Image (spheres, rainbow, N blue to C red):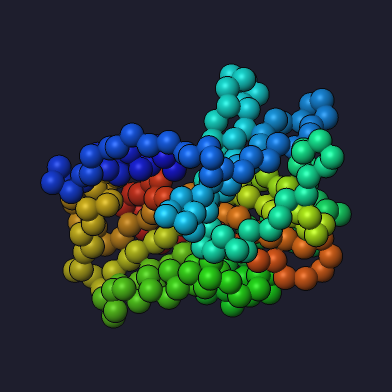
Amino acid sequence: MSVADYKQDEGLPKADREKYKTWSYDLTATDVYVPRFTPGQQHWFAAVTYTGTSNEHARVLVMAEQPKTKRWEMVAAVDLDDKTQLPKIALDSHGYATSVDAASAKNVAAPVDVLRSAVIDNFRTGGDLTGTKVFAPTKTSKRQVKAQDDTADKFGSRGTTEFSSATTDFPDSYALKTADGHALVVFAHTHIQRDAVSHSGLEIVPSKENRAWLGTKPSPYFTYTFNCSNAAVVPRTPDKSKLIGYSCRRTDAEAAGPSNAA
């Protein structure tokens, strides 16, 4: 996602590029959650940073040690829509958090594959199939549905936009036990957006944001790939989960036609 940001910016006209400014996280406004791990488990920890005049903006970060390089990398960054929805993380007597295997139905009511499918359904159908069954209404889930609603009709009668799922580029998930026994789950998903004209003789002109991948040559159809990080509060017993944040980046685009991909 970060590499895509750089690539997209380099593809913009120079007049539209913003100058990079040095930045850092304020450690005095950061909560760090380090789980205990058994030998053989991947080492990672989570942090919640706060910004704004009254720390009103919250972001969940996940740092993971890479097995081959032994270097620590930030593998997820999710902006929360409402910091009050962030649950209290359970800590033991030594201040350690507890990691949760979010892929197992024994630990969470909705395993990460179910969460991922529901998120993609928010984009594909507005949540009609599984999105609203898995997630309770939140500002975040409504924002995903709105993205689908706003994009689906952007061409009017001259074209169509469809969303579909794609193989997740980063299938790992990271979860912490909350004070009430549930889990805060951070996970990624990948989805596809396909724009196509409705009539022969029409073409789509690449937007400035897409020039890094598409150049300026028009085409009857374009396919865009998005990678996204999501954060959800997932109950342990059967109940709806709450999507509390997501961040997406366009990571690829090509002049590719319609597909029957699910």
Q: Nearer the viewer, residue 20 or 73?
A: 20
Residue 111 vs 72, above or below: the answer is below
Q: Nearer the viewer, residue 12 or 200?
A: 12
Q: Nearer the viewer, residue 137 or 221?
A: 137
Instruction: Write down the quadrant of residue 236 in the picture.
Output: bottom right
Q: Residue at x 43, y 75 (%)?
A: 149
Q: Residue at x 78, y 45 (%)?
A: 91
Q: Position of residue 167 (x, y in %)?
A: 57, 49
Q: Residue at x 35, y 43 (%)?
A: 5
Q: Position of residue 130 (x, y in %)?
A: 65, 71
| Residue 76 visible in rendering | no
Question: Which residue is most to the top?
Answer: 69
Q: Nearer the viewer, residue 57 or 114?
A: 57
Residue 199 vs 117, above or below: the answer is below
Question: Which residue is most to the bottom?
Answer: 157
Q: Residue at x 24, y 48 (%)?
A: 211
| Residue 96 visible in rendering | yes
The N terminus lies in which quarter of the figure? Answer: top left
Q: Position of residue 192 (x, y in %)?
A: 46, 57
